[in-house]
Image (tube, grey):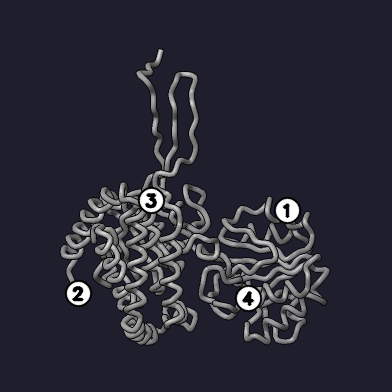
Amino acid sequence: MKDASDIHEIMMEIGRKAKAAAAELAFAPAEVKRQALEAAADAVWARRGEIVSANAKDMEFGREKGLSDAMLDRLFLDEDRIRSICDGLRTVAAQDDPVGEIITEWDRPSGLHIQRVRTPLGVIGVIYESRPNVTADAGALCLKSGNAVILRGGSESFHSSGVIHDCLVDGLEQAGLPRAAIQRVPTRDRAAVSEMLTMTDHIDVIVPRGGKGLVGLVQREARVPVFAHLEGIVHVYLDAAADPEKALKVVINAKTRRTGICGSAECLLIHRDIVDTIGQGVIKALLDAGVEVRGDEMLQKIDGVTPATDDDWGREFLDMIIAARVVDDVDAAIQHIRSYGSNHTDCIITEDDAAAARFFQRLDSAILMRNASTQFADGGEFGMGAEIGIATGKMHARGPVGAAQLTSFKYLVTGDGTVRS
């Protein structure tokens, strides 16, 4: 264990290197960044056996730490998941480079020509838990958007993230980009997190990716601006005009595909008119799938449903548990989501265009869905190749944060000896 002064010096040196690297990345050619990411993908695949071995150490550490099955699933890597990491790197590599993109341009009567163009944010600090694939996602997206990045992964994924980070650095070196463009905090010591949150001279934005405890800590203590979502309290509303087959497919997938991700459904709302038909069928299917259903008084009449408590509304279970409630209509569903949601992702199952339009118009979640599983709340599924997180705030980035969302903009103003009268 290093003492506090050692950690401070380590982080200051990382910050200085990141700042210098960011200055170079801001004008790095698109083709060079693409080459770096493709070389990184090749390195990840070539070293997949090493990554699996490192992950086995992390899994053992996670089990000893008492991680839940859902959290262990987030941590686990096998060859298929490593292939997905490679695919994500290559997808980001193939995307159009956002840096320098002209967002809009116009002429003024004064003779000025004005362009608003995308420009990197600078240095991004990413603090995350468990999921080692975030190392690749965050590194790729920051590089693509011309930003240097400081990665601080969770203690659980320390070994897996270390090998993946080495692969990213291999890609940088092969492309002739600075190694410090993607740095990883080399210690599990939590003092490094505290340092990152106050490095206003070196870090331009912090992205926390993890549970409520981590994100809450970052939002409370950071002096650096933060892109964050606190929780994924995801709702699915079965409207009176829901199609029974779609309802069954979507709800089961939204809850059970992977319970430990932020797009997993945590609360099911059922229109009163379909409780005894579609609603009952969906509830029984959830129970048969091994989901613990915590229902309101009306739903407790269904065999196997346990009573919901007040604490179950607005709770992120990240487990095979779902809260369920009967509502009178779409407006009651909207009101419940406004009261208990987290502005992350919410879904309506309906064939009624008017009900869907009302749901979309009157809720302000970062992602709203109709007749589709909330497990699609993911940057990769949105065609971004990967995401650095899902932002639920209203400033700058919102929803899946991909490469374009990791840029700001500047104005380029051109005249011809133009002066102001």
Residue 210 drawn above or below residue 160: above
Q: Which residue does the image show at 47% across and 63% down from the upper left?
A: 385
In the image, what residue type sits under mark 4? Asn
Measuring from the top left, give residue 148's x and y in whole percent: 31, 55
**Upstream in the sequence, badge 3 or badge 4?**
3
The residue singled out by tag 4 in the image is 253
Q: Which residue does the image show at 77% across and 56% down from the upper left?
A: 353
**Upstream in the sequence, badge 1 or badge 3?**
3
The numbered disc on residue 357 is 1
In the image, what residue type sits under mark 2? Met
The residue singled out by tag 2 in the image is 1
Q: Check disc 2 and report its element: helix, strand or loop.
A: loop
Q: Nearer the viewer, mark 3 or mark 4?
A: 4
Residue neighbourhood size for the residue with mark 4, other residues' Cα within 10 Å, grouped as few (<14), some (14–19), many (≥20): some
- Left or right of 264 on screen, residue 294: right
Circles 3 and 4 in contact, beta carbons < 8 Å: no
Q: Check disc 4 and report its element: helix, strand or loop.
A: helix
**Residue 61 visible within the image:** no
In the image, what residue type sits under mark 1? Ala
Q: CA distance from mark 2 to mark 1?
A: 56 Å
The numbered disc on residue 225 is 3
Measuring from the top left, give residue 79's x and y in whole percent: 42, 82
Q: CA distance from mark 4 to mark 1?
A: 23 Å
Circles 4 and 2 in contact, beta carbons < 8 Å: no
Q: Quadrant of residue 343?
A: bottom right
**Upstream in the sequence, badge 4 or badge 1?**
4
Q: Nearer the viewer, mark 1 or mark 3?
A: 1
